[in-house]
Amino acid sequence: MSGRLVLGGAPLGQPGDVGPRLRAAMASADVLACEDTRRLHRLATDLEVTLTGRVVTFHESVERARLPGLLDALSSGATVLLLTDAGMPSVSDPGYTLVRAAIDAGIEVTSVPGPSAVTTALAVSGLPVDRFCFEGFLPRKGGERRSRFAGLAGERRTMVFFESPHRLADALTDAAAVLGDDRPAAVCRELTKTYEEIRRGGLAELAAWAAEGVRGEITLVVAGASAEPVELTAAELAAEVAAEEAAGAPRKDAIRAVVTRTGLPRRTVYDAVVAAKASSAAAAPQA
């Protein structure tokens, strides 16, 4: 006999968003695996739920170590409820390794659907939601972050990212440099909580706002690329490539980023760079 692994959607901020099914699952689970036991007990108190099962931590630093014990419990017929601090487990939170291991072991995996910062931010962003992609957390280092944005410059779908508050201003600045100052975006802060705030505008405008300091949980939504190629002069194209190089990108990568962002042929961008270089050399004083 094998048990069941249940993924529970935890509230983003408001305990009232929890439905009766999750309350029942919390009360009846044999094992409750969670990121932070204090948050779990606080949630149980808010929901007036008595936990009768064994509570174990399941966060990034112990995820691998906890797998054998949880799989043993599941194989013995236990129901294991997995909860993260907010939203759905395994969506940029612990859970994927346990889900994959349970599936491989032939154990039933199901869920009690609940809140998700991804879809909540999309819904309130005011940006197109018919097609979107979730990109998780952005790289911490500036160069890697700009490379990620360069790779997404031609993405037509609305994009959703998670970001920490102390890196938000830098992330928005990098996004503006690669995707364009006026690319529409929305910063969704503290979703469903007391100080919920939704800021909408161009990337450069949002970067200036974030530079003053931002707190709380952040979900960033960025509009996808326009289907129409951007119209720029040769001098403007060369300046775009120069800006990419100034940010640390090699010439080849800088040209690729501008090609992706503008939708123009590579030859057009390359010729603009060559023309600008020749013009600069001609204008330089002769020795």
Image (cartoon, rainbow, N blue to C red):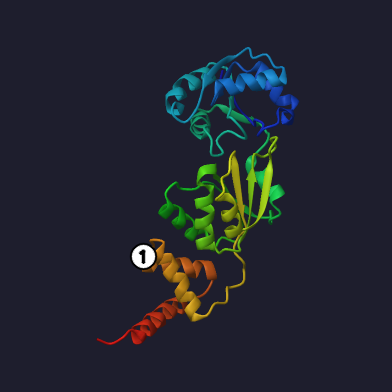
Residue 251 appearing in the image: yes
Q: Nearer the viewer, residue 167 or 126?
A: 167
117 is higher (above) or lower (below) than 178? above
* Res 194 → quadrant: top right
* Res 32 → quadrant: top right
Report the amino acid beneath label 1. Pro
Provide residue 57's location: percent of width, then percent of height. Answer: 51, 22
Provide the residue designation for mark 1: 250
Provide residue 140's location: percent of width, then percent of height. Answer: 44, 46
Q: Nearer the viewer, residue 47 or 239?
A: 239
Residue drawn at x 41%, y 83% as measured from the top left: 275
Quadrant the C terminus occupies: bottom left
Residue 146 left/right relative to 213: left
Q: Nearer the viewer, residue 101 or 201?
A: 201
Provide residue 166's location: percent of width, then percent of height. Answer: 51, 43
Q: Residue furthest top?
A: 52
Residue 24 appearing in the image: no
Quadrant the N terminus occupies: top right
The secondary element bearing badge 1 is classed as loop
Provide residue 22's location: percent of width, then percent of height. Answer: 69, 25
106 is higher (above) or lower (below) than 134? above
Residue drawn at x 50%, y 52% as measured from the top left: 170
Residue drawn at x 54%, y 54% as measured from the top left: 172
72 is higher (above) or lower (below) than 170? above
Residue drawn at x 50%, y 67% as measured from the top left: 260
